[in-house]
Image (tube, helix red, strand yellow):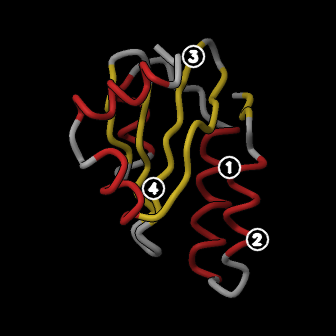
Amino acid sequence: MDLLRKHKLIKLKNKNRGNAKLSKAIDKLISNIEYAEWTKKTDVKATRSDADCVHSDGFYFFDLNIHRTMILIVFEDNEATVVWTGSHDEYDKIFKGNKTTIEKWLRNQKLI
């Protein structure tokens, strides 16, 4: 699977250079996505237990619990696009852990 906007994950990794566990978790996420042959939601969850489908259009949050880092990715036609990265505190501030708020944010970003 092609991973678009991968630079956002690399930037997050570089920003937290001293955190080896987070770097490994980001590398694993990248690898899981690039080598994935996911065709349905259950495939994503089977590979990544930290994945949470937040919108039926293929938007998932991944919770890299090691650093309480949240990553929003959309899957579509054998492509994955990194849409947003941030800390869990930033996630709570912007999205409030609420799927309705997430959908509103996606609409405001013209992603849905």
Query: Which amino acid type is marked by label 1?
Result: Ser
In the image, residue 77 sits, relative to residue 105, either above or below, namely above
Which image quadrant is residue 98 in? top left
In the image, residue 101 sits, relative to residue 95, either above or below, namely above
Please give the residue where the numbered disc 4 appears in the rendered image. Answer: 70
CA gap between label 1 and label 2 equals 17 Å
Q: Are marks 2 and 4 in contact (CB under 8 Å)?
A: no
Task: Please report whichever mark, 2 or 4, sits nearer to the chain's N-terminal start.
Answer: 2
Q: Are marks 3 and 1 in contact (CB under 8 Å)?
A: no
The x, y position of residue 6, in whole percent, is 74, 44
Please give the residue where the numbered disc 1 appears in the rendered image. Answer: 31
The x, y position of residue 40, in whole percent, is 41, 19
Please give the residue where the numbered disc 2 appears in the rendered image. Answer: 14
The x, y position of residue 9, in whole percent, is 68, 54
> Which secondary structure lies at badge 4?
strand
Query: Which amino acid type is marked by label 2?
Result: Asn
Depth-wise, is mark 1 or mark 2 nearer the camera?
2
Q: Residue at 62% of width from left, 61% of height from top?
A: 26
> Which secondary structure lies at badge 3?
strand
Depth-wise, is mark 3 or mark 4 nearer the camera?
4
Depth-wise, is mark 2 or mark 3 nearer the camera?
2
> In this view of the protein, which residue sits in the foreground, 79 or 102?
102
> Which secondary structure lies at badge 2?
helix
Query: Which amino acid type is marked by label 4?
Result: Met
> Which secondary structure lies at badge 1?
helix
CA gap between label 4 and label 1 equals 17 Å
In the image, residue 9 sits, relative to residue 79, either above or below, namely below
Task: Please report whichever mark, 2 or 3, sits nearer to the chain's N-terminal start.
Answer: 2
Task: Please report whichever mark, 3 or 4, sits nearer to the chain's N-terminal start.
Answer: 4
Please give the residue where the numbered disc 3 appears in the rendered image. Answer: 76
